[in-house]
Amino acid sequence: MESSHDRDTAGLQAYADELRATFMRLQSEGAELHAKARALQVTEKSRDGLVNATVGARGELIRLDLDPRIYRHPDARKLADTITETVQRAAEKARERVIEVFSPLIPAEQMRAHLDGDLETVMAQLADQMGGRG
């Protein structure tokens, strides 16, 4: 009859094997995925079509194009709000694409928590995995 200690040991061994396999996949595929993510760019058009914003993988603004028609009805506040909203939508799409790029290696929720800097969630996920609950 298998004891509780034997089951715990077997569970830890299985988890160690899983970590080893994940690490090997990260080594073989990680650099390529990282390069793909770093090269990622997303362009989003404003709802009125007058602003185009291109951001990188981290949501940083790479390029901003303004249609000359913005000068027909000058409204600095509206233009600023439109630019901000467009860049934010592009950044969110870029974030989701980064999550997709890494999805073969890292579960989406784990990657979201990492990108959000949510250490508490990352640690809880790790504890769940180590406890055999993940």
Image: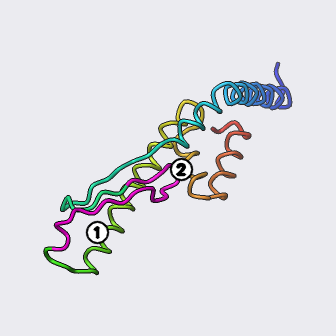
Image spot of residue 124 (x, y percent): 66, 51
Q: Measuring 14% from the left and 77% from the top, which residue is drawn there? A: 73
Q: Residues within 10 Å of mark 1 (few under 14, many from 20)?
A: some
Residue under label 2, please give it. 112
Q: Is residue 83 left or right of residue 39?
A: left
Q: Residues within 10 Å of mark 2 (few under 14, many from 20)?
A: some
Residue type at tag 2: Arg
Image spot of residue 41 (x, y percent): 44, 46
Magenta-drawn segment: 54-71
Q: Is residue 101 left or right of residue 124?
A: left
Helix, strand or loop at label 2? It is helix
- Depth check: 74 or 95 in front? 74
Residue type at tag 1: Thr
N-terminal label among 1 and 2: 1
What is the quadrant of residue 53 in the picture?
A: bottom left
User: For residue 82, which numbered disc appears in the image?
Assistant: 1
- Depth check: 105 or 58 in front? 58
What is the quadrant of residue 32 in the picture?
A: top right
Above or below residue 32? Residue 91 is below
Q: Is residue 80 left or right of residue 114?
A: left
